[in-house]
Image: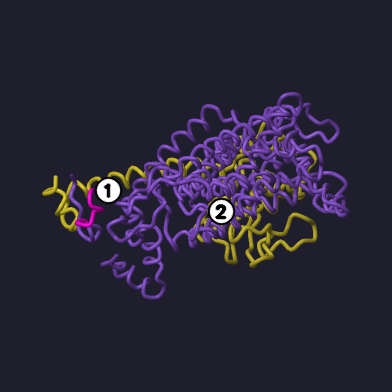
Amino acid sequence: MADTATPAQAGSGETRRDFLYLAAAGMGAVGAACVAWPLINTMNPSAEVLALASTEVDLAPIEVGQRITVTWRGNPVFIDHRTEKEIQLAGDVDVAELRDPEADSARATKPEWLVVVGVCTHLGCVPLGQKSGQERGEYGGWFCPCHGSHYDTSGRIRKGPAPLNLPVPPYEFTGDTSIVIG
Amino acid sequence: MSGFQTNSRVIKWIEHRMPVFSFLDHSIGSGYPAPKNLSYMWNFGSLAGISLVIMIVTGILLAMQYTAHVDMAFDSVERIMRDVNSGWMLRYIHMNGASFFFIVVYIHIFRGLYYGSYKAPRELLWMIGVVILLLMMATAFMGYVLPWGQMSFWGAKVITNLFSAVPVFGESIVTWLWGGFTVDNPTLNRFFALHYLLPFVIVAVVVLHIWALHTFGSNNPLGIDPKGPQDKIPFHPYYTAKDAFGMGVFLILFTAVVFYIPNYMGHPDNYIPADPLATPAHIVPEWYFLPFYAILRSIPDKLLGVVAMFGSIAVLFILPWLDTSPVKSGRFRPIFRLFFVLFMVDAVLLGVVGAKPAEGIWLTIGRIATAWYFLHFLVILPLLGVFERPRPLPTSISKPVLKGGGASFAGATAKPMEKA
C-alpha cells in the first residue's frame, strides 16, 4: 500500500520495511556464520593429529642425576632423575616467595622423577640444562638463552622475564619405571 | 542520479580522504543506473563472481592441507577427505565449485552470444571476458592435476603434449613445461604454484571486465540503448535483490550436488594413484573441456588438431567483427535465432562426442559438428548481417511495456515509486 510505504522510504521510524531489512540481514549473517565455522574449523588439529597425543617412556635406563628429552605433541618434555640434593633444594624454597607459587611436592608425584614441558613460558624457546656442561642458570635447573629466564630444580621460574613455571604435562606411572605422558 | 550521501561521520572522514564509498555506490549501489528490463539471464555475471570467491576461499584452505609432491599429493588429498575437520566438504565444494563456475560462465557466454553483448561499444568487454575464460581453463586444468590420480597424471601428460605439435620447437617446449622427461615432481610443483597464482590474476582481469562493463553499462534483452533515466533503475536495491535471489537458487543447486552427488561430474579413475607406467583405457577431460577435446580429436592431423582447438576459442576474440549485423538482440533477428539454437545444439553435441571413444559414428559426428562450429562463426554470422532482415526495434526500453514510451515516468527513479 502506498500509504504504508511512504514513511519507510523517507528513512524514518520503525516500519515493516526496516524490520524486513534487519530480518533479512540477520538471517544472512546466521547463514554466513554457519558456513564460516566448518571452514575455519578445518584449520584445527584433526582427530588423527590428536590421536598421536600420548607418549610412553621407559625410565629404567635413566641414571640418578641424568636428564633426558622426549617428544610429546611435537614439543620437548624434560625428564629429570633428580639427585637427593636437587630434591632437597627444590623442597626448601619458601613457596610464598615464588612468582608462580607451587610446591615441589605438587609438581613431582615421585620426588626423584621430575617431568616438565621443556618450553620456556616466556616466548617458547627450549631452555638449556639437559646436557652435561650446559648452563643451568643460577638455581641449578634450566636456563633459557633467548631472554635469560632461570628455572630451579623443580622447573619453577625464579628469575628473568618468563611469567610461569615450566608446566607439568599430564602423565601417570604405568609401572615402577615407566610413564605415559598425555 | 544524485551523488553519494551519508550521515555517518566515520564514512564521511574516510570518503573525504579516499572516495571508496562513492566508488562502491557507483559500482554496485544506488548510484549505478542499470537498464530496467534485465532478465534473469543477467544474473550469471554476479554468480560467476560469487563462484570465484567460493573457489578462492576453499582453495586457500585446501592449500593449507595439501602437499605438492608426487609421493605425498594423493595421500594428502585422502587425508583431507578422511581426517581433516570437514575436509571432505571443503574438497567437494572446491571440486564441484569448478564445475559450477563453468556452468555459470558458459550460460553467461551464451547469454552474450544471443543478445549480442559483444557488439560495439562492448567489444573490449567481451574480449576481456574471453581472456578470463582462458585463464579459468588453465587454472581448472592445473587444479585437476594436483590430486595426482590417474586422470590427473594422464590429463597433464596429454594436454602438455599438445605443445609438441608446435613445429621445430615442440619437443623443447614440452620438456620445458615438464621440467623433466615426463610429467613428474617438477611439473606438479609448478602446477601448484600456478594454480594458486592464476585465480588472483583472474580477479585482476575481472576488475578490468567490470571497469569496461561500467563504461557503457549492461546490455539488455532488447539490445537497444537506454534513452534516458526513465529506462533505468538503480542497481541497488533492484538488481542487488535480484542477484541475491539468483544466488539463493544457485546455492541450493550447488549444495544439492555437493552434499548428495559430489562425484557425479568426476571420474572414478582419479581415485587411483597416478601410475606413469599404465594409461587408463579411456581417458577423458572434465566435462567442461569436452567440446574442445572433441574438436581436437576430429582433425586427423596433430598440428591442425591443436590449431583447431585453440582456434575454437580464438574465434571468439574476433566475434565482434564477424557478426556484421547492427542489431544486437537475437529477439529481433529471426534467422539468427534459428542458427543460434543450432549452434547451442552443436556445442552440446561436441560435448557428447568428446566423452565418447574417437571411433566409428562418433568420429563422423564429431567432424560434422566441428565443421559447423567454425562455419557458424566464420560464414553464417558474417552473411546473416547482410542477408537477414531484422524485425523493427522498439524506440525505447519503456515503449513495449508502457504505452507511450513511459514519458510520463521521466525522472521516476528520483521519486519514490509506488507499489501497484
Residue B131 can be seen in this image: yes
- The residue located at (41%, 67%) in the rendering is B20
The hue of chain A in the figure is: yellow
Q: Is residue B145 left or right of residue A61?
A: left
Q: Is residue B171 magenta?
A: no
Out of B169 and B363, give the one closest to the viewer: B363
The residue pinned by badge 1 equals: A22
Neighbours of disc 1 within 10 Å: few (<14), some (14-19), many (20+): few
Is residue A71 positioned above or below B395 on the image? above
The image shows residue B330, relative to residue B271, as above or below, that is below
Q: Residue at x 63, y 35 (%)?
A: B287
Q: Identify the residue under disc 2.
A: B129
Q: Amino acid at mark 1?
A: Leu
Residue B39 percent coordinates (x, y): 38, 44
Quadrant housing the C terminus of chain A:
top right
Please name the amino acid that badge 2 sits on: Gly
The stretch of residues the image draws in magenta is B403-409
The percent coordinates of residue B250 (x first, y second) are 45, 38
Tell me the CA gap for discs 1 and 2.
36 Å
- Shown colour of chain B: purple
Looking at the image, which residue is at 46% across and 40% down? Answer: B334
Q: Residue furthest bottom?
A: B17
Work out whether A162 lies above or below B293.
below
